[in-house]
Amino acid sequence: MLFAFMMAGAGAPPAWPPPDRLPIVAELPDPFLKPDGTRIRARREWPAQRRRLLETILHYQYGPLPPKGAKVTGRVTDHREVGDLGSVRDIELSMGPRGVVKVRLMLAVPAGKGPFPVILDGDLGWDRLNDAFIRAVLGRGYILAAFNREQVGPDSAERKGVYEAWPNYDGGRLAAWAWGFHRTLDYLLTLPEVDGKRIAATGHSRGGKCALLAGATDERIAVTAPNNSGCGGAGNYRFHDDKCETLEAIVRRFPYWFHARFAGFMNNVQRLPFDQHTLKACVAPRALLTTEALGDLWANPRGTQQTHQAAREVYAWLGAPDRIGIHFRQGGHEHGLQDFETLLEFCDVQLFGRTVSRRFDALAFPDAERVWNWSAPARSPRSSGVPTASSGDL
């Protein structure tokens, strides 16, 4: 009864035991299991189940997201043309109470009449998105919107950004950065050139971790695409080899990325009441792509395939097996043009129904073990149709 500890009864507030009081689960936990120990059977039950899973994940791993805060506003600080492909604007966003959190947004918009689909990236502070990236995205008819998540919350234990805005806020940086995705999206949806039904969120490494969390917690994001996100992202806590980052390693080095409760699972991972396939499943039935590098062993590519395959069981049960994809390339830990081109093709398929030659179902590790002992429930005769997404974030 994996989630039986969560609630005392219908309508009761969650009951959260400390990690050492949770049951041991050696395999990847069952995402279909309800708080009372029974399993969901109908697709209409998925939205409520998804919310319960997210509550558990946020409580034990990332912590809560900050409050929504005041309306997000933007002030253009610079503008330039990119040949005949479009234009780039630098914008200062004001978020949080009284707009005290200031975040830089780079907005590249194609020439012509919109609205246009959007690739939303939180990695602007890494100074990686040069003109080659901008031209590649504009040339495909997409907006590239990149914000500096480190202005939402610094990549350190220093309590600035949202932590100054809400001094009692205790969520980790990954939760705060996911909030940055949501608030940047709030602003984008005010712009006439933005197609609000076709938003993809992406990021690399730690940026991929928070992009995955952002997509799981905001149903306005149509495509979620973490790149090389590894431990704490698309990877696998329970199953890895000696060359992979572990829960213990990431919490020792980056404790501020997570809620303080997460440290209770160090050397205790089998008591974790979920694994990252659960977070991936919380994106369903919206589209999800994980892009991985075979040489990036620290990010556990084999374990990422395992979480992909486990989450795909949820997608298939919801009638959306083609909305989850994975792609492996040669090379190491980077977010290059090849990864962006893969994402753009996946978005072409998912957002426009276009045909591309690239596959998104090829497994790099066909011999990878099935590390879960559950299967999708048999659907009841009334269980039909894919649940529709509601607007807004968790």
Image (spheres, rainbow, N blue to C red):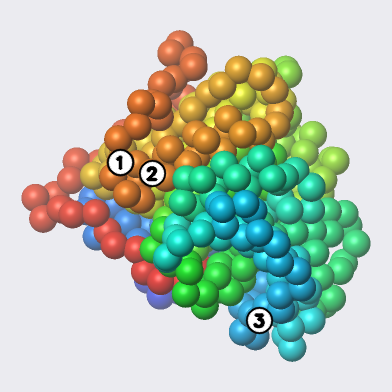
Kindly identify which residue carries mark 3. 73
Q: Who comes first in sequence, dot 2 or dot 1?
A: 2
**In this view of the protein, which residue sits in the foreground, 166 or 144?**
144
Q: Is 160 on the left or on the right of 110, as rendered? A: right
Looking at the image, the residue that sits furthest to the top is 367
Q: Position of residue 29 (x, y in %)?
A: 47, 39
Eye-nearest disc, 3 or 1: 1
At 57% from the left and 33% from the top, the residue drawn is 339
Kindly identify which residue carries mark 2. 348
Above/below status of 122 relative to 105:
above
- Which mark is drawn over residue 225? none
**In this view of the protein, which residue sits in the foreground, 239 or 80?**
80
Q: Is 113 on the left or on the right of 259, as rendered? A: left
Do labels 3 and 1 touch, CB within 8 Å? no
Q: Quadrant of residue 4?
A: bottom left
**In this view of the protein, which residue sits in the foreground, 77 or 11?**
77
Q: Quadrant of residue 311?
A: top left
Do labels 2 and 1 touch, CB within 8 Å? yes
At 79% from the left and 43% from the top, the residue drawn is 251
The amino acid marked with disc number 1 is Arg
Between the C-alphas of marks 2 and 1, the distance is: 6 Å
Kindly identify which residue carries mark 1. 354
